[in-house]
Amino acid sequence: MRLVSIMALAIATGFAVFGVAMSKTNPTQNEYEEYAVQQLTQYLKTDVCKKTSKLIENLLNSSCSKMVDSANPRMREVISKTTDRQDFILFSVYRTDLTLGSWLPGYKFETVGAFHNFYTYSAEQQ
């Protein structure tokens, strides 16, 4: 009987330590914004810029990658305004609805943040 009590106490202590660790490492809104800007920048440079014709780059006198880099502060502002964070103390869920106008497709992202990391589990084009 004593062994069962010790095991139960050890398991409860383990869950408590795990919960405290999760709550201490729950990412903030600013950390999510940095992550989202990094992911969006990478997507634009690897997918969108490669599809951009050289004619457009010549007309704008700038490379696509440079334009993406220069838009970084604006991207963070847009992500900040279009993101809803649900804080569950142990982890957070971020929902970002990027709809920039009727002439561009919109995107919805859902991301969970825990242990100072992010996992985007849903990304839909509207």
Image (cartoon, rainbow, N blue to C red):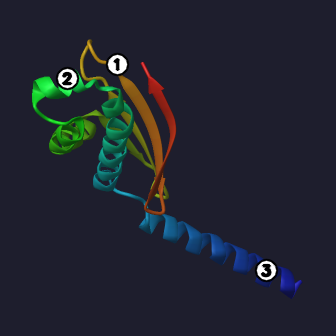
Q: CA distance from mark 1 to mark 2?
A: 19 Å
- In the image, taking residue 67 as reference, residue 22 lies left or right, namely right
Tell me whether circle 3 and circle 1 mark residues in contact (CB < 8 Å).
no
**How many residues crowd around disc 1 within 10 Å: few (fewer than 14), some, or many (20 or more)?**
few
Residue that numbered label 2 is attached to:
56
**Distance of mark 3 from mark 1, alpha carbons?**
55 Å
Secondary structure of the residue carrying numbered label 2: helix
Which residue is drawn at the image coordinates 25% and 23% (left, top)?
A: 100
Give the residue displayed 28% in from the left and 53% down from the top. Answer: 30
Numbered tag placed on residue 87 in the rendering: none
Callout 1: helix, strand or loop? loop
Identify the secondary structure beneath mark 3: helix
Under mark 2, the amino acid is: Ile
Label annotation for residue 7: 3
Q: Residue furthest right?
A: 1
Q: Which numbered disc, 3 or 1, marks the residue that appears first in the sequence?
A: 3
Mark 3 crowdedness (10 Å alpha carbons): few <14, some 14-19, many ≥20: few
Residue situated in front as seen by the camera: 99 or 55: 55
Pair 1/2: label in front: 2
Tag 1 residue: 105
Which corner quadrant holds the N terminus?
bottom right
Amino acid type, mark 1: Pro
